[in-house]
Amino acid sequence: MIKNQRTIYNVIHAESRGLHTGRDIQVILSPAPANSGIVFQRVDLPGAKRLEAVVDNVHSTQLATTLGEGENRISTVEHLMAALVSLGVDNILVEVNGPELPVFDGSAAPWVKLLKDAALRDLGVSRRAYVVTRPFMITDGDKSIEVHPASRFSVEAAIDFNGAIGRQLFRYVDGDETFIREVSRARTFCFLKDVEFMRSRGLALGGGLENAVVIGDDGILNPEGLRYGDEFVRHKLLDFIGDLAMAGAPVIGRFIITKPGHELNRRFVAEALAEPGLLKAVSLTALGAARPATRPAARLSLDEGRWAAA
Ligand SMILES: [Zn+2]
């Protein structure tokens, strides 16, 4: 895991359609100093206050994760958030001229490419993180998120849909380039039958086969097919990683997520932060020095056994 805080070297300018408004949206990502965090700013609203990417500022989770409220809101921030936390970018200013971020192809891969092209800069200050101190779980019917103490970040994700998607399991273990290779390219998805309903409510106006996997009665409508055989569960994992970043720092633990969604993800972060002593704030340079005390081999075999039995 990256030990020092990072930002970007070069300013990034990008433009793409917004998924819900259908408008072209411009975004500018700029370097920011250590300990300033990930901060969003609407530049089309005079005097709009800056929105820090923390769970207290998440005011809607319908179809996407939205920071802010009323006019000063920015939606669909989760794919950028997932790319930032996975690349170890803790500090950045994101200026946008509309109520949502550009959707690009519906995955985090274009954000990863933009960030890598801008080059990442080590700020020479230790990265902060949260370490999970004991098991914790929240549920909503048959949906759940649980976490256990572990020496590295991992997620076992399960989804269960009718029809073309079915039941999918995926296990992610944080490591060099793992997010980029295994998760970043997974696209958002929707069912054709839901599209008309969303459009009638003024949503998904910019949605199409170029920025989502669309599932009809007879299967997937996208002529190019899937990017991963289990692209759906990988996208749910991508969303979870982005939403978990609203804790304000990486959370080191072993997560087991079943049928996750943006609202459950938000609730998990809010409740975990409010739970006394559950998340211990650490400096990653200090944690690195203490690493030999952990027993990764034993943990890994335990993980494998549990996951095989799930
Ligand atoms: Zn998503």
Image: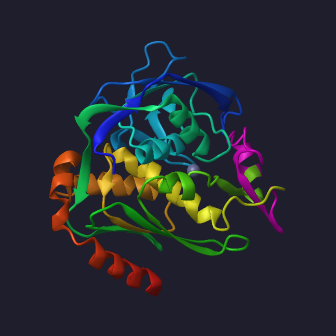
Q: How many numbered circles are shown?
A: 0
Judge whether 132 appears above or below 197 on screen.
below
Q: Which residues are magenta?
A: 196-222
**Is residue 58 located in the magenta-colored stretch of the structure?**
no
**Is residue 209 located in the magenta-colored stretch of the structure?**
yes
Judge whether 104 appears above or below 46 on screen.
below
- The residue closer to the viewer here, 284 or 259, is 284
Residue found at x 72% / y 38%:
206
- The residue closer to the viewer here, 61 or 190, is 190
> Can you tell which quarter of the image residue 31 is in?
top left
Residue found at x 43% / y 48%:
86
- The residue closer to the viewer here, 277 or 59, is 277
Residue found at x 32% / y 42%:
248
Residue lying at the far top of the rendered structure: 46
Residue found at x 37% / y 66%:
255
Residue 38 visible, this angle:
no
- The residue closer to the viewer here, 61 or 298, is 298
Q: Does residue 236 appear to the left or right of 289 in the view shown?
A: right
* Residue 134, position as x, y percentages in the image: 21, 68
Residue 240 visible, this angle:
yes
* Residue 17, position as x, y percentages in the image: 69, 33
How are the residues colored? Answer: rainbow
* Residue 32, position as x, y percentages in the image: 36, 24
Judge whether 6 appears above or below 257 on screen.
above
* Residue 46, position as x, y percentages in the image: 48, 12
Judge whether 79 appears above or below 153 on screen.
above
